[in-house]
Image (tube, helix red, strand yellow):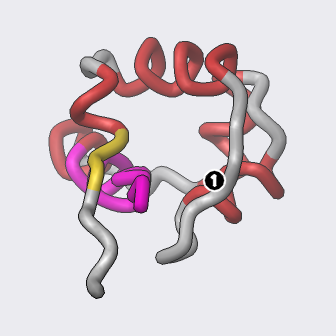
């Protein structure tokens, strides 16, 4: 399964900048729809485009492996 680490990145950025960051702000800054961001935060993840991944990596100033990770399915 692919897991998106959006919550972790949002918390880290908020801590670094000393302020609260919400999904609406991320949506406005990246052009990724708020509903898509919300779905990316769910434990099961969500299908998304490389354009969205690129925008999020740019916003969080991170590499793709900081945004997503592969978690093996349990047998």
Verify whether residue 26 appears in magenta: no
Q: Is residue 57 above or below residue 8?
A: above
Q: Secondary structure at mark 1?
A: helix
The magenta stretch spans which residues? 1-12
Query: How many marks overall?
Result: 1
Q: Quadrant of the C terminus?
A: bottom left
In the image, what residue occupies the spot 75% across and 32% down?
A: 32
Q: Measured from the top left, where is residue 61 in percent x and y? A: 31, 16
In the image, what residue occupies the spot 55% across and 25% down?
A: 53
Q: Quadrant of the N terminus?
A: bottom left
In the image, what residue occupies the spot 39% across and 58% down?
A: 3
Q: Measured from the top left, where is residue 19 in percent x and y? A: 34, 50
Left or right placement of residue 38 versus residue 18 in this view: right
In the image, what residue occupies the spot 66% across and 25% down?
A: 52
Within 10 Å of the Cα at label 1, are there few (<14), some (14-19), or many (20+) other Cα atoms?
A: some
Viewer-closest of 8 and 44 = 44
Q: Measured from the top left, where is residue 23 in percent x and y? A: 63, 53
Q: In the rendered image, which residue does mark 1 sit on? A: 23
């Amino acid at each position: 399964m692919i897991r998106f680490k959006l919550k972790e990145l949002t918390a880290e950025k908020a801590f670094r900048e000393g302020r609260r960051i919400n999904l609406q702000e991320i949506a406005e800054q990246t052009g990724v729809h708020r509903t898509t961001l919300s779905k990316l935060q769910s434990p099961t993840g969500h299908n998304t485009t490389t354009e969205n991944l690129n925008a999020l990596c740019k916003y969080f100033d991170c590499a793709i492996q900081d945004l997503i990770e592969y978690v093996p399915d349990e047998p």
